[in-house]
Amino acid sequence: MKTLLRSFIIVVAAVLAFALGGVPGLGAQAGGMMQSKTGDLNMDGTANSLDALIVLFHDAGLAEPPEDIDAWTIMADVDCDLAVTALDAAIILQADAGLYELRT
Ligand SMILES: [Ca+2]
Ligand SMILES: [Ca+2]
């Protein structure tokens, strides 16, 4: 089951990366000084599908843990269950669609 979930995440990630025109950034944009919000993991000023993709990459073990894992976890754990999972990615996507309001 976990292998199936991992395969699903890889496919979704590849489709999203292609559809959005690139591989999601895992760090701040160069020169970006935007205030980061909860769920805004690439610190581009908005929580959107790229941030959800970052969560999925980490949940699937496809990305290196960030340097400051505690601060990153606070930003990524949008449902405050003390774990960063695909559910956080789903909530970020709902917020991006205007169906959910993330805490600030
Ligand atoms: Ca973002
Ligand atoms: Ca969570």
Image: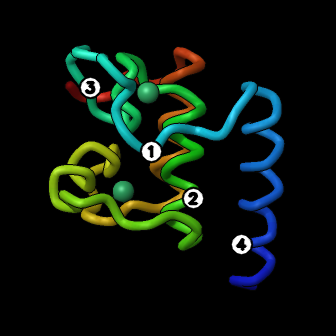
**In the displayed structure, would residue 51 be above or below residue 101?**
below
Mark closest to the chain's N terminus, 1 or 3: 1
- Seen in the picture, residue 94 relative to 64 is either above or below; the reply is above
Residue sitting at x 32%, y 51%: 77
Specify the amino acid type for callout 4.
Arg
> Tags 1 and 2 in contact by the CB under 8 Å rule?
yes
For the residue marked with disc 3, what is the amino acid? Lys
- Count neighbours of disc 3 (C-alpha within 10 A) and say few if under 14, some if 14 to 19, many if 20 or more: some
- Nearer mark to the viewer, of 1 and 2: 1
Asked whether the residues under the numbered discs 1 and 3 touch, taking CB atoms below 8 Å apart as contact, a structural biologist would say no
Q: Nearer the viewer, residue 99 or 31?
A: 31
What secondary structure is marked by label 2? helix
Mark 1 to mark 4 CA distance (whole Å): 19 Å
On screen, residue 8 versus residue 59, left or right, reads right
Residue hosting label 4 = 6
Residue tagged by mark 3? 37
- Circle 2: residue type: Phe
At horizontal 59% and vertical 19% (from top left) the residue drawn is 97
Judge by depth and name the residue closer to the eye, 45 or 4: 45
Residue at left 20%, top 25%? 104
Q: SS of the residue at dot 3?
A: loop
Query: Where does residue 89 sit, x and y in percent of width and height?
Result: 52, 46
Query: Which residue is denoted by mark 2 in the rendering?
Result: 57
Q: Three-letter amino acid code at disc 1?
A: Leu
